Amino acid sequence: MNPAERLQADYDGLGLSTGPHPVALLRPALRAEGIVPAANLARHRHDSFLTIAGLVICRQRPGTAKGHLFISLEDETGIANAFVPSKTFERHRLVITQERFLTIHGRLQRVDDVISVYALRLEPLRYDAAELQTVSHDFR
């Protein structure tokens, strides 16, 4: 089996991978596109525009957040958090709620040593193993 097939078999049998993170298989292409790994976000300046991508591990849309959404994306280097304002959520609702892997374009926010990405545009992260059955933890 090739690496993608092994990964698919892991998720089919265990619901997780015992090998490389799914995004690790995409990193060469992501690097070529300038997509920033989670571990490198701290190297960027506040308010700089950048793109992150990864496996959605959590979506939170608390009732007290006035329609805003918080997303946690995981890649092979760690977790990146994104803030999605309510208008952006409404514009990209189907992508946000249906896709397992996302690409988020936005502005880096650094407030009190907390780093997140203010999402301006979201799109599916195309992944060859489209049938990979991952599960995110969604809170509404």
Image (tube, rainbow, N blue to C red):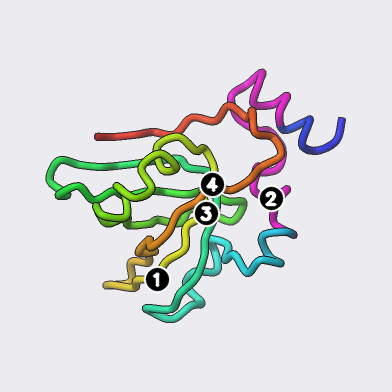
The span shown in magenta is: 8-28
- Residue drawn where x is 80% and y is 38% of the image: 3
Q: Which residue is mark 3?
A: 103
Name the residue at the front extreme: 91
Q: Amino acid at mark 1?
A: Arg
Q: Amino acid at mark 4?
A: Pro
Q: CA distance from mark 1 to mark 4?
A: 18 Å
Q: Which residue is mark 2?
A: 24
- Residue drawn where x is 47% and y is 63% of the image: 105
List x then y, in percent, for residue 32: 71, 67
The mark lying in front, picked from 4 and 2, is: 4
The mark lying in front, picked from 3 and 2, is: 3
Q: Amino acid at mark 3?
A: Thr
Q: Which residue is mark 1?
A: 107
Q: Is residue 7 left or right of residue 125?
A: right
Q: Earlier in the sequence, mark 4 or mark 2?
A: 2
The mark lying in front, picked from 1 and 2, is: 1
Q: Earlier in the sequence, mark 1 or mark 2?
A: 2
Q: Earlier in the sequence, mark 3 or mark 2?
A: 2
Q: Is residue 58 above or below residue 70?
A: above
Q: Residues within 10 Å of mark 3 (few under 14, many from 20)?
A: many
List x then y, in percent, for residue 95: 44, 42
Q: Depth check: give the residue in front, 119 or 94.
A: 94
Secondary element under disc 2, as helix, strand or loop, is helix
Q: CA distance from mark 3 to mark 2?
A: 15 Å
Q: Quadrant of the N terminus?
A: top right
Q: Earlier in the sequence, mark 3 or mark 4?
A: 3
Q: Residues within 10 Å of mark 2 (few under 14, many from 20)?
A: few
